[in-house]
Each structure stands twice: as structure tokens, then as C-alpha cells.
Image (cartoon, grey):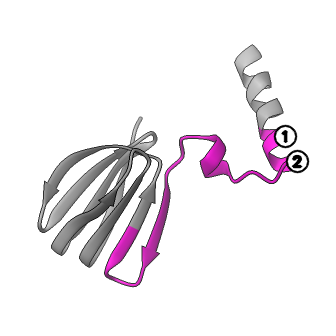
Amino acid sequence: MAKNKKSKIGDKVNKLLDIPQEVSTNIPKITILGFEKMLIENYKAILEYQEFYIRISTHIGILNINGYELNLNEMTTDDLLITGKIDGIDFETIT
């Protein structure tokens, strides 16, 4: 109960200061640029990487990316840039 109250106070402070939710939490932010670039922020780990399939672990589930000539171009501890011909994306939630 105390944790829920603390979370509500944090949400109010973030809203008051106009801080984006993905900055203050571990929720991933996915930006898709056309069919050839994808930026994933707040990811945990790369589970599987092949030229046609990439699996990324996030704090709320697993992101599956299908395509052709997929590459991990830029990687930091928080951000990941994927390039190539992206055909499909699906998300496996954690239950």
C-alpha cells in the first residue's frame, strides 16, 4: 500500500515537471522511421540476433523484430538502433 502511494506521488511530480514517462520509468520507447530504422530506448538485453530476426528483452516483455539484412548499428546501455528491411514487429508481454 505504501509503495502504491509512493508511485502516485512520483506520477504527480513527473506530470507537474512535464517529465516523459519513459524517462522516469523503465517502460521502453520504440521509434520507427519508415521501414528501415528502429530506435529502442530502455531495453534490457539482446536475447537473439540474426540477419532476419532479433529478440530484445525489455522491462515489460520481449520485442520480436522480423525482416531482412537486420543490423544492430548503434548500441548504448539504454538505446539500440536497428537498421534493415523491417517486415514485422510483435510483443510478448510478461505475465
Q: Residue 87 appears in which quarter of the rendering?
A: bottom left
* 37 is higher (above) or lower (below) than 71: below
Q: Are marks 2 and 1 in contact (CB under 8 Å)?
A: yes
Q: Which residue is mark 1?
A: 12
Query: Does residue 21 show up?
Result: yes
Tell me which residue sits at (35%, 76%) in the image: 37
In magenta, the rendered stretch is: 11-38
* 88 is higher (above) or lower (below) than 8: below
Q: Label 2 vs label 1: CA separation?
A: 6 Å
Left of 29 or right of it: where is 76? left
Left of 80 or right of it: where is 59? right
Q: Residues within 10 Å of mark 2 (few under 14, many from 20)?
A: few
Q: Residue 39 appears in which quarter of the rendering?
A: bottom left
Point out the residue furthest to the right here.
16
* 34 is higher (above) or lower (below) than 58: below
Q: Which residue is mark 2?
A: 16
Q: Secondary structure at mark 1?
A: helix
Residue 57 image position (x, y, % from top left): 33, 44
Tell me which residue sits at (34%, 83%) in the image: 35
Tell me which residue sits at (13%, 68%) in the image: 52
Q: Residues within 10 Å of mark 1 (few under 14, many from 20)?
A: few
Query: Does residue 1 show up?
Result: no
